[in-house]
């Protein structure tokens, strides 16, 4: 039996992970589950999988969680510290599927125990790539990518030598607004941005897909995880979302990962790694698919891509500033306080204001990363009208 914990169990990735576990119940023991505000769902999952511990991120909801699990014998806890402590429970495999920088500290704690970390929480690598990779190395822990593009690259690299890799091509659907006239983007609403053409995901990553901030995070994630130079990372718009990424080798070969847009593939690959097992994902009928199309991303439509390359060039803790500013700008957009295009303008403004700030060249410790994250969030108020 493999012992498994899931951070962010109640979200889109968390639920898909539990779906796969449910199909092979006898192979897994679920140790700890964490969630946020959705106490009913967290309690139902905890009871179904008879876990040892259920944690809500919000201390104000602890009593609700206790009440929902009364008589079950399941331990409960609440708050950011409790989330980190949940990673102290012995486990063989931990899914990191909290959204945002909040996923960083629990993931780091899991690595310290040498636990295999299935990483959906791309923000961890963007904020603190060197720290996370060093922690994994120091404790002999393995990080398995769960983002579909990075799982695709990881699979294309099996048996290959990184020295033979010439480039990595990350595909992008183009998001909800890829065919909108540019003039309309400024007026795009939260509801319109929350509707992805190909993938069914949490609201925040769906909006980030429309603005391509998600792709920007993924370029930095690629750089950090595969230790590849930024100029070797390309982005191509591929509206069908059937090719998840490609790896180009020195002999000109391009290895593509092709499959239906279903996160259970990437999650299942990480869950079963290094083996492959049956997964309940649709099989592609290529004759039915007919054609795959590609186009270069339009820089005017997607300023986030340029910002990602600027972040990689600047290095240090600039990724933490970028992510923190992006998270706060997204909060403001969701709250209806700034427009869709104001998000990229705000992040750009914050990066300009913080360029040269000594905090960004501090050592990559957790405290320093969280400090930069906070100052970047605070700076957003100074560069927006909100
Ligand atoms: P989601 O919004 O559906 O779920 C997020 C989970 O995190 C929930 O369990 C929520 O309760 C919890 N959470 C939210 N804020 C928290 C906080 N401050 N502290 C602790 N827990 C908190 O998100 P999702 O779409 O499942 O995405 C999760 C992560 O996976 C993100 O990093 C996202 O970028 C990444 N990812 C998601 C997909 C996808 O298909 N959904 C694909 C690739 C990568
Ligand atoms: Mg992705």
Image (cartoon, helix red, strand yellow):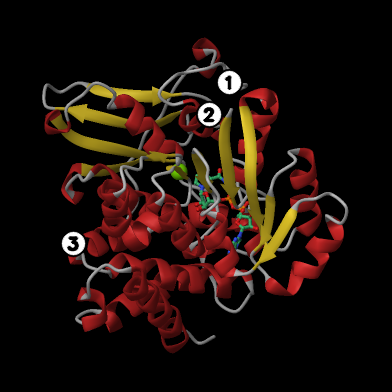
Q: Which mark is residue 268?
A: 2
Task: Answer above or below: position of 384 versus 194.
Answer: below
Which residue is nearer to you in this view: 273 or 29?
Answer: 29
Q: Circle 2: is it few (<14), some (14-19), or many (20+) Cα within 10 Å?
A: many
Q: Position of residue 159 (x, y in %)?
A: 24, 21
Left/right placement of residue 296 relative to residue 167 reads right
305 lies left or right of 269: left
- Relative to 249, does residue 134 appear above or below in the rendering? below
Choose mark 2 or mark 3, whichever is in front: 2
Residue 197 visible to an observer of this rendering: no
**Judging from the image, what secondary structure is the residue with disc 1 in?**
loop
Name the residue that disc number 3 marks.
Answer: 313
Give the labeled residue for mark 1: 279
Q: CA distance from mark 2 to mark 3?
A: 34 Å
In this picture, is 381 found above or below 301? below
Q: Name the residue rendered at 23%, 64% in the picture.
A: 310
Residue 29 is left or right of residue 170, and the answer is: right
Label 3 packing within 10 angstroms: few (<14), some (14-19), many (20+): few
Please tell me which of labels 1 and 3 falls first in the chain: 1
Check mark 1 vs ligand 1: CB closer than 8 Å? yes or no: no
At mark 2, the secondary structure is helix
Mark 1 packing: few (<14 Cα in 10 Å), some, or many (20+)?
some
Of 111 and 125, the residue lying toward us: 111
Q: Which is nearer the N-term, disc 1 or disc 2? A: 2
Q: Look at the numbered disc 2 and say if its residue's Cβ is closer than 8 Å to ligand 1.
A: no
- Disc 1 + disc 3, Cβ < 8 Å: no
Residue 27 drawn above or below residue 207: above
């Amino acid at each position: 039996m493999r012992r498994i914990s899931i951070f962010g169990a109640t979200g889109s990735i968390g639920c898909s992970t539990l779906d796969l576990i449910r199909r092979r119940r006898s192979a897994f023991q679920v140790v700890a589950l964490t969630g946020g505000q959705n106490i009913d769902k967290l309690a139902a999952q905890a009871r179904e999988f008879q876990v040892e511990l259920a944690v809500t991120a919000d201390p104000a909801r602890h009593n609700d969680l206790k009440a929902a699990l009364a008589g079950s014998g399941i331990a409960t806890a609440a708050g950011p510290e409790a989330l980190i402590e949940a990673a102290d429970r012995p486990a063989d495999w931990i899914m990191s599927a909290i959204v945002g920088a909040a996923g960083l500290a629990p993931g780091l704690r899991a690595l310290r125990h040498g636990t295999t970390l299935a990483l959906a929480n791309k923000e961890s690598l963007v904020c603190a790539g060197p720290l996370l990779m060093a922690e994994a190395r120091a404790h002999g822990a393995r990080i398995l990518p769960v983002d579909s593009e990075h799982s695709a690259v990881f699979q294309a690299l099996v048996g290959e030598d990184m020295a033979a890799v010439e480039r990595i091509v990350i595909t992008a659907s183009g998001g909800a607004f890829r065919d909108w006239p540019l003039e309309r983007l400024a007026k795009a609403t939260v509801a319109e941005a929350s509707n992805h053409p190909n993938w069914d995901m949490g609201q925040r990553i769906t909006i980030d897909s429309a603005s391509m901030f998600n792709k920007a995070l993924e370029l930095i994630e690629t750089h950090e995880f595969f230790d590849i130079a930024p100029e070797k990372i390309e982005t191509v718009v591929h509206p069908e979302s059937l090719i998840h990424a490609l790896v180009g080798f020195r002999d000109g070969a391009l290895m593509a990962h092709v499959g239906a847009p279903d996160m259970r593939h990437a999650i299942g690959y990480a869950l079963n790694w290094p083996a492959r097992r049956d997964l309940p994902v649709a099989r592609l009928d290529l004759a039915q698919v007919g054609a795959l199309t590609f186009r270069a991303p339009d820089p005017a439509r997607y300023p986030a891509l340029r910002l990602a390359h600027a972040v990689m060039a600047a290095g240090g803790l600039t990724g933490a500033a970028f992510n923190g500013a992006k998270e706060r700008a997204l909060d403001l957009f969701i709250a209806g306080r700034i427009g869709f295009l104001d998000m990229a303008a705000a992040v750009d403004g914050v990066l300009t204001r913080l360029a040269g700030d000594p905090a960004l060249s501090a050592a990559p410790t957790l405290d320093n990363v969280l400090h930069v994250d906070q100052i970047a969030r605070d700076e957003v108020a100074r560069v927006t009208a909100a």
